[in-house]
């Protein structure tokens, strides 16, 4: 019988420290045994965004207690770990170095190999942790705070870029528009919540590159359009943007969300049509957006396309996706863990170049 490998995964690329334990046995889908997360949102909120140096220092405080927590929850001990996986990039350099340093120190102390994981591959494979895991091949829509990409995925490590954003990411468009409307960081979920009370048809905002004929995205112009629209309405009301009546802010939020969602949905459908694939995987923080899920579900059902999402709590950054991606890479023979602890990190690292 195949030996069970126990993998520890550490995520520290941005403002969440995540640690998880995954068990890998033979050809079966790796199993999540325990995961723990510490979000730094409260700390960064005072600054309106992530402060990289504060993020790194907080990862240092959290990573070992979270590791002890997952071991306790899974009823395992440190020496039982077979592989220590960590996020190697992309992300904030200092924050990545904390995870890489701790992973390599643990690996060296336990005499166990380490494996650096691509953060976006973690997101991409996170739906395999859900109750309804996908099967290869599929089209993947990766929508996070830093990336917006459509990929053709043939298997683990076999990724072809179909299109990506030429400027801001979808999550960034949510976050920046939210900030303009005076909403707290992180703006995406706040804007989505406010949008629930608004009329998405109230204001006409641009759908960038919708008819570009390719699968690239551009969201930088959207926040400018939101700002121009908001200032125009504020001038009419004789107030500042932040003091606009609640119903106007809700209508602006709903119209902004509708513009982002429409572009993401239409480009995903074009990617499915162009590749002839009948399966779509949505991953990354923006994948938690309710409107995006509703519209993708409806459009894909009409086309007999299956859509898979990560569990809602695993859409944003977490350690489970890092341990899972490491396990799936090892299982697919794409990568073996290394007994060399001379680590580096890759703050910029295109997913199709791994
Ligand atoms: O994947 P993620 O946790 O971090 C990165 O790798 O970037 O994604 C975070 C992004 C942020 O931009 C956040 O505002 C956005 O995901 N986000 C959402 C929602 N939840 C998180 N955007 C829209 N609607 C949501 N419900
Ligand atoms: Zn992420």
Image: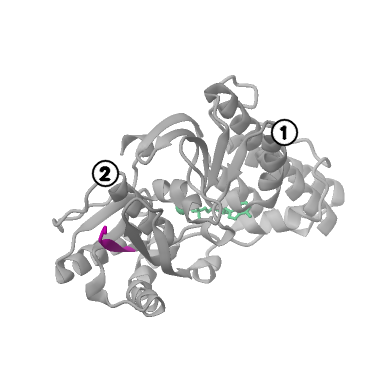
Between 100 and 20, the one lying in front of the other is 20
Vertically, is 68 above or below 96? below
Relative to 282, 291 lies left or right: right
Between 75 and 71, the one lying in front of the other is 75
Q: How far from the left and from the top, in percent, is residue 203? A: 80, 39
Q: Which residue is at 19% across, 67% downward? A: 105
Q: Which residue is at 59% across, 33% downward? A: 268
Q: How far from the left and from the top, in percent, is residue 3? A: 25, 61
Task: Give the extent of the magenta segment.
Answer: 1-8
Vertically, is 203 above or below 4? above
Q: Is residue 286 magenta?
A: no
Q: How far from the left and from the top, in percent, is residue 259? A: 70, 38
Residue carrying label 2: 333
Relative to 213, 153 lies left or right: left
Mark 1 C-beta to ligand 1 under 8 Å:
no
Vertically, is 29 above or below 21? above
Residue 302: which disc?
1
First in sequence: mark 1 vs mark 2: 1
């Amino acid at each position: 019988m195949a030996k069970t490998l126990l993998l520890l995964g550490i995520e520290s690329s941005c403002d969440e420290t995540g640690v998880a334990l995954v068990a890998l046995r033979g050809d079966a889908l790796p199993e999540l045994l325990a995961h723990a997360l510490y979000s730094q949102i409260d700390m960064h909120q005072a600054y309106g965004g992530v402060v990289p140096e504060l993020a790194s220092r907080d990862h240092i405080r959290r990573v070992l207690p979270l590791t002890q927590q997952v071991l306790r929850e899974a009823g395992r001990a440190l020496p039982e770990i077979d592989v220590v996986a960590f996020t190697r990039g992309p992300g904030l350099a200092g924050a990545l170095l904390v995870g890489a340093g701790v992973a390599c120190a643990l690996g060296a102390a336990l005499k166990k190999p380490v494996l650096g994981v691509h953060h976006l591959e973690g997101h991409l494979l996170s739906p395999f942790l859900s109750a309804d895991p996908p099967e290869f091949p599929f089209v993947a829509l990766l929508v996070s705070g830093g990336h917006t990409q459509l990929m053709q995925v043939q298997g683990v490590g076999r990724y072809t870029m179909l299109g990506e954003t030429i400027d801001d990411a979808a999550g960034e468009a949510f976050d920046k528009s939210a900030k303009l409307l005076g909403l707290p960081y992180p703006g995406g979920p706040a804007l989505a919540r406010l949008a629930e009370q608004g009329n998405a048809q109230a204001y006409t905002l641009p759908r960038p590159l919708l008819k570009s004929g390719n699968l690239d995205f551009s969201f930088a112009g959207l926040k400018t359009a939101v700002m121009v629209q908001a200032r125009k309405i504020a001038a009419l009301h004789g107030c500042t943007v932040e003091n606009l009546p609640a119903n106007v802010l809700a209508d602006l939020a709903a119209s902004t969300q509708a513009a982002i969602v429409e572009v993401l949905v239409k480009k995903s459908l074009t990617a499915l049509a162009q590749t002839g694939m009948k399966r779509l995987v949505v991953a990354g923080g923006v994948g938690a957006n309710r409107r995006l899920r509703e519209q993708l579900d409806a459009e894909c059902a009409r086309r007999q396309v299956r859509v898979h999402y990560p569990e809602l709590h695993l859409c944003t950054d977490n350690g489970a996706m890092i341990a899972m991606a490491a396990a799936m890479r090892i299982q697919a023979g794409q990568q073996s863990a290394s007994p060399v602890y001379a680590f580096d990190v890759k703050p910029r690292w295109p997913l199709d170049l791994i």
